[in-house]
Image (tube, helix red, strand yellow):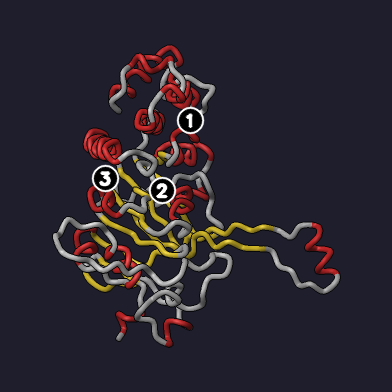
Amino acid sequence: MSTPILSLANVSKRFVKPLDASERIANLLGAHREPQIVRAVDCVDLTIMPGEVVGLVGESGCGKSTLGRIVAGIQDPSEGVVAFKDQDIACMNKVERRHANLAVQMVFQDPMGSLNPRMKVLDIVGEAPVVHGIIPARQKERCVSDLLGRVGLDASAIRRYPHQFSGGQRARIGIARALAVNPTMLVCDEATAALDVSIQAQIINLFVELREEFGLTYLFVSHDLGVIAHVADRVAVMYLGRIVELGATEAMFASPNHPYTQALLSEVPQLEPKKKKFSALNSEIPSPLKPPPGCSFHTRCPHAFARCKTDRPALREVGPGRLSACHLNDR
C-alpha cells in the first residue's frame, strides 16, 4: 500500500474563552464561573491517500471547517497527531514543516474575503512562489499568466484588482493562488457555496480537470451532498466535532448506516416523480460548549435508547471500507 499523504490520529481542537475581569471578581465572591471551552473537533481519526478526493460533510457548526484548517496547517490541533507522509508535522524541523505546509494549500469559501483588495492579481498569485524561492522574481508575470490560463482566465487579468471580477472569476483566482506553490493536496472549504449554480458546475469541473492534470489530492469540505456525490471517492460525515460515518461515496449514498447520515441523505433533492414527506431533524444541533453525554446525536436520533445517553460509541468497521459510530450496530 502507498503511504498516506496526510493522516490524523485522535485530533482535537479546543477554543477557550478565558474569564474576563468581572467574572474573576465574581468568582472571588463565590460565583464559580468557569472558562468557556468550545469543542470544535473531538478525537478525529482520518487518513487521506494520494490522488484521493475525500468529502467532509455535516451541518453548519459541526467543526468541518476547523478540521479543514487543521489539515491545511492554518491551525494547530489542541491534541493528537497530524502526519504528512507518515511524519508528525509537530516534530518536523523548519525546512520539513515549510515543505509540508506548501504541499497542502487551502481554497477558501469567500474569495472576496480571502483576496487582498489592494493587490493586483499579479501579486496575489505570484507573491508566494517568489517568496518561497519556487520561481525567480523575473519570471513572476509569466508564471501568473500561465496559472490564470490553467484556471480559465485571460492573462490580461494580471493587472486588475479583485473587485473588478465576478464571483466565479474570483474563485478561479483563489484556485490559481493555491496552485502557485505546486501543492500536492488542496483543502476546499465550501469553495462553491457562494456561487450561482451554473458557476458552481464550472468550478467543480475545473477541480476535476486539475486533479487529472496535476495528480492532486482533495479534502472537499461542503454541506452540499450533491456536490460531494459528484466529486468524492470517500465521504466522512461529521457531527458535533466527531466523524460519525466514513466510507466510499457510492456505498454510503446507497445505504447509509448512521441515523444522522440517513437523515442528511433523506433530504437530498431527487428528480423522482413521487411525493416525498419532509422530515427535519428534531431540534437544533447541541452547543459545542456543552455537548451531550454518550452519543452526541442521541438528543435528535429517532432510534436512541438508554445506552446512547451514557456510552460514547466508537467509530468501528461495519462493512468493507465502512466505519460507523452507532450503538445500533451492536443490536
> Callout 1: 10 Å neighbours few (<14), some, many (20+)?
many
Residue 326 pos. (x, y %): 35, 76
Q: In the figure, 69 relative to 63: above or below?
A: above
Residue type at mark 1 is Leu
Q: Nearer the viewer, mark 1 or mark 2?
A: 1
User: Would you say 50 lies left or right of 85 here?
Assistant: left
Residue 147 position by quadrant: top left
> Callout 3: 10 Å neighbours few (<14), some, many (20+)?
some
> Callout 2: 10 Å neighbours few (<14), some, many (20+)?
many
User: Would you say 105 lies left or right of 216 here?
Assistant: right
Q: CA distance from mark 1 to mark 2?
A: 27 Å
**Element at label 1:** loop
Query: What number is the disc on residue 84?
Result: 2
Observer-nearest residue: 83 or 19? Answer: 19
> Are the residues at dot 3 and dot 1 in contact (C-beta closer than 8 Å)?
no
Residue type at mark 3 is Gly
Residue 122 position by quadrant: top left
Residue 20 position by quadrant: bottom right
Observer-nearest residue: 99 or 174? Answer: 174
The answer to whether residue 215 is seen in the rendering is no
For label 1, the residue is 115
User: Would you say 279 lies left or right of 81 here?
Assistant: left
Residue 303 pos. (x, y %): 35, 81
Residue at horizontal 45%, vertical 60%?
62
**Element at label 2:** strand
Q: Earlier in the sequence, mark 3 or mark 1?
A: 3
Query: What number is the disc on residue 51?
Result: 3
Q: CA distance from mark 2 to mark 3?
A: 14 Å
Observer-nearest residue: 317 or 163? Answer: 163
Residue type at mark 2 is Phe
